[in-house]
């Protein structure tokens, strides 16, 4: 059975934030006003977290790209009263906007804080408004949104493979962040398929998952820095 | 004076009759249902599917060019009609009007009957080219319509998708269709 997952090599991540930008443009992520940003109401399905270690001038910086963990035991799903968020057949935690009632229980249940609420109708600067991706719906006011591993790309990839009468390959379906990463720090594929790179990478001795002790069973793995 | 009281009292209890009440409620329901119907779709010319698909034996692909290749089937533009209607004025009044419109260079913009919300992924290629489904299964008998229908002949709701998918053991996963 397919289980989509991601392995992020923190040794390779340079903190360039290309993944963050690619994600925003791919998924029609709305911009918010400075006042709303101050209230913590920005959207970042993929966010590069930065950590500064040591005192100036002997400082080092570490980066950690953080998408939705697509948990196999997702706490958000347990609290959704209307099944708008649920664990899909191939491991993607779906968020069905049309079904969402905006109660925000899931946003509060998520230990990784990757669920975002639309307090207002989405806004874009004039120039960006005409460049929205038609494959991703614009979320209305009052619903929760989050990273979906770009599952709209999977919908097309499956059709393409079916049309050619072949099996889906690793390169057929890559989310925008993995595709754009200049250092290939982000690797994406089917965790259960030995032909996919993530299958082996997730067994690397450096592999760990965020807050594993909570039993959420994330499908995003990190390869911890060597030094 | 006194005698008028019982007389009036006799008429006062005329309660609204159940039949009248029922009719009023019915009329209201019909009015509400009418108001919430999908609005009718108008077309620039009274296109006749029957004579083009049956008499002239034109393939659906001739006008709905992308039905085997893409998500959307596509509607024809003036150029498609022009390949016949520009050369010769037709027999019927409507056909002559088409020729006049085309000669004047008016763009013909046909309107969609069925329109899914933007949060749904639906692909004609997947269903027509790959799944080998007949157009009529989802669109009804539009190929033999003589005037453009103003409403879809078959309503396509999520239940229609799910019923067929269930019957044909296809995906029922929300993220297969929603996006």
Image: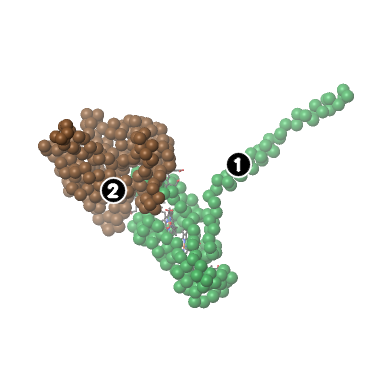
Residue nearest the viewer, comparing A123 with B2: A123
- Colour in which chain B is drawn: green
Q: CA distance from mark 1 to mark 2?
A: 50 Å
Residue A89 visible in rendering: no
Quarter residue B69 falls in: bottom left
Q: Residue furthest top?
A: B2
Q: Quadrant of the N terminus of chain A?
A: top left
Above or below residue B99? Residue B141 is: above
For mark 2, give the secondary structure. Answer: helix
Looking at the picture, how far across and down is residue B151, in whole percent?
53, 54
Chain depicted in brown:
A
Q: Which mark is residue A22?
A: 2
Q: Residue furthest bottom?
A: B88
Task: Name the residue carrying label 1.
Answer: B29
For mark 1, give the secondary structure. Answer: helix
**Crowding near the residue tagged with mark 1, few <14, some 14–19, many ≥20 C-alpha atoms within 10 Å:** few
């Amino acid at each position: 059975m397919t289980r989509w997952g991601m392995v992020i090599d923190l040794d390779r991540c340079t903190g360039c934030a290309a993944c963050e930008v690619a994600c925003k443009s791919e998924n029609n992520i709305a911009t918010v006003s400075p006042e709303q940003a101050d209230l913590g109401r920005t959207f970042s399905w993929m966010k590069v977290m930065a950590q500064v270690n040591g005192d100036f001038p002997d400082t080092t910086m570490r980066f950690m790209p953080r998408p939705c963990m697509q948990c196999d035991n997702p706490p958000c799903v347990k609290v959704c009263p209307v099944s708008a968020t649920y664990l899909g057949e191939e491991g993607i935690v779906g968020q069905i906007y049309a079904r969402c009632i905006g109660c925000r229980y899931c946003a509060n249940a998520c230990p990784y804080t990757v669920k975002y609420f639309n307090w207002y109708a989405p806004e874009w600067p004039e120039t960006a408004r005409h460049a929205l991706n038609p494959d991703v719906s614009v979320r209305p006011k009052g619903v929760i949104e989050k990273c979906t591993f770009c599952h709209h790309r999977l919908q097309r990839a499956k059709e393409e493979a079916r049309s050619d009468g072949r099996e889906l390959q690793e390169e057929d379906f890559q989310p925008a962040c993995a595709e754009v990463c200049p250092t290939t720090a982000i690797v994406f594929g089917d965790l259960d398929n030995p032909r996919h790179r993530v299958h082996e990478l997730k067994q690397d001795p450096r592999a760990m998952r965020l807050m594993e002790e909570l039993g959420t069973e994330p499908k995003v793995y990190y390869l911890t820095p060597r030094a | 004076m006194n005698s008028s009281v019982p007389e009036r009292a006799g008429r006062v209890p005329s309660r609204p009759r159940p039949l009248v009440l029922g009719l009023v409620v019915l009329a209201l329901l019909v009015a509400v249902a009418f108001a919430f119907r999908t609005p009718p779709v108008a077309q620039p010319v009274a296109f006749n599917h029957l004579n083009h698909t049956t008499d002239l034996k034109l393939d659906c692909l001739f006008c709905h060019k992308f039905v085997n290749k893409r998500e959307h089937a596509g509607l024809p533009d003036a150029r498609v009609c022009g390949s016949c209607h520009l050369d010769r004025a037709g027999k019927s009044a409507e056909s002559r009007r088409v020729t006049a419109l085309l000669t004047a260079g008016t763009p013909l913009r046909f309107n969609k009957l069925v329109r899914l919300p933007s949060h749904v992924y639906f692909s004609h290629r997947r269903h027509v080219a790959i799944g080998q489904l007949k157009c009529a299964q989802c669109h009804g008998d539009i190929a033999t319509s003589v005037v453009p229908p103003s409403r879809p002949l078959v309503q396509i709701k999520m239940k229609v998708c799910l019923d067929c998918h269930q019957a044909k053991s296809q995906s029922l996963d929300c993220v297969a269709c929603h996006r």
